[in-house]
Amino acid sequence: MSDHVETAGRPAGRRPGPVPASSAWRPGDHPGERKFVDLGWLPLEADPRGGIDVTLAYETWGELNADGSNAIYVAHAFTGDSHVAGEREEGHLTGGWWNGLVGPGKPIDTDRYFVVSANVLGGCQGTTGPAHPHPEDGHPWGSQFPYVTLHDMVVAEARLADHLGIDAWALVIGPSMGGMRAVEWAASFPERVRAIGAIGSTAATTADQIAWHATQGAAIRLDPHFRDGDYYDAAPGEGPHTGLGIARAIAHTTYRSGPELNGRFGRATQDGDVLRPEGIFAVESYLDHHADKLARRFDANTYLRMLHAINTHDVGRGRGGVEAALSRYSGEALVVAIDSDRLYPLADSERLAAALPRCPGVTLLHSEVGHDGFLVEGSGLDDAVRGVLARVEERVGVVG
C-alpha cells in the first residue's frame, strides 16, 4: 500500500543523503504520538521457540465511552503503521495514511468514536520487530526474528484490546493486509467484533499474489548488502536499500492499474534519450522515486516478515476452509473491491462476501488508480464506511 497518491516521478536534482541501513523506529527514538504496552509472552504459530516477549506501539484518537461500545480498530496495510491520522512530525516519517477517512467529522469520526491502531508484530515503527534489541545480547534481532502470521498479529491486537478495556470493537477495518486482519478477527474472535471492513482484500492469498511477492522477496535477499538479515551495523548507503527499493517498485506496479500508468505517463521520458541505455522513461523515474521513499522509512527484514504473513494468510487454515471459518461470524460486514484492482481483484472480494453471513454483497468502487484507489477521496468509500457503522448502531446501539 502506498502512503498516498502521487502524480510525479522523483524531482530533478540531487536526492537527500545516503539511505540508512534501516529506517526502522528503535527504542530511544522520539515516540511521536505512540503509546506502548508490554504484552508479555506471545505465542507464535510457527516459531520453534514457541513465542517471544512483545511490546506493542499504538496510537489512539477520541475518547472511549462508559460502556466501551464506541471503539474502532483501524488495521494498517503492508508498509503502513499506527499513524492513521495526523501530520508528519517528529517521530513520524509520514503523515496519517488515512487522513481522508479518520478524524473529526469524517466517516470514522473521532468526535464520536474511540479509534485505535497499532503497528503490527514484526513491524518497524515501534512494535517488537527485527530491528529491536534481542533480549539476550541487546543487538538487533535481525535474522533471528521469527516469521509471524496474521493470526499472531491479531492475537497481539486482542491483547491490546484487553489492555484498553475493550470487550468488543464496534468495527475492525483495514485496507489490503489490514483487511485480511479484519477477516482474521472475525474468525478468531467473532464475539469481539460487531462489524468488519475488508477493503481491497481477500480471505486467502492466491498463487498469483504469492508469485508477485516471490520476486519482491528475492530482490531483497539477493542484495549483497542484505547479509542474511544482519545488516543493522552497516553505514548509511551500505544497507540493503537497493533490493528493498526493487521490491517496492515491483509491488507499486501491482498497486496501480495499467490504464492509470499509461494515461499518466505514456511514453514520456524523464532524463536523456531513451534510445541510449542511460535514458529513462518517466514511469521508471516514478518507480525509482517510490523505491527511494520506502527505503527511507522502512526496514528490509520487516518487509520479508510482512510478505510471509500475507503469503500464509488463509482464514480457513485449520478451520475447515474459508466458508466454515467465517460461518460462525454473526456481525455486520463491509467488503469493498476496487474495479481496477489487479492485485486483489473482484473475485477475491466476492468469495469473501459470500462467506460472511451478514454481508450484503460486495461494494464495488470505481477508480482508475487500481488497488490504491482506497486512498483516493471521493471514490465512494466514505459512504460505504458510514453505512456499515449505521448498521452497527441500529443493531447494537453504539453511543458515540
Image (cartoon, rainbow, N blue to C red):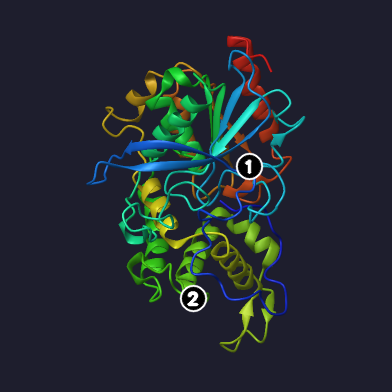
Q: Which residue is mark 2?
A: 235
* Position of residue 56 measured from the top left corner of the image (x, y, whole percent): 48, 41
Answer left or right for 349 relative to 136.
right
The relative height of residue 341 versus residue 399 in the rendered view (above or below) is below
* Position of residue 13 measured from the top left corner of the image (x, y, whole percent): 72, 79
* Position of residue 30 measured from the top left corner of the image (x, y, whole percent): 61, 53
Q: Can see residue 203?
A: no
SS label for mark 2:
loop
As shown in the figure, which amino acid type bears the numbered disc 1?
Val
- Classed neighbour count for the residue bearing mark 2: other residues with Cα under 10 Å, few (<14), some (14–19), many (≥20): few
Q: Earlier in the sequence, mark 2 or mark 1?
A: 1
Q: For residue 49, which quarter of the picture? A: top left
**In this orientation, which residue lies closer to the viewer: 219 or 64?**
64
SS label for mark 1:
loop
Residue 84: which disc?
1
Residue, x 43% and y 48% (percent of image)?
128
Residue, x 43% and y 17% (percent of image)?
191
Which residue, as the protein is rendered here, is positioned at the far right?
A: 105
* Position of residue 62 measured from the top left corner of the image (x, y, whole percent): 68, 28
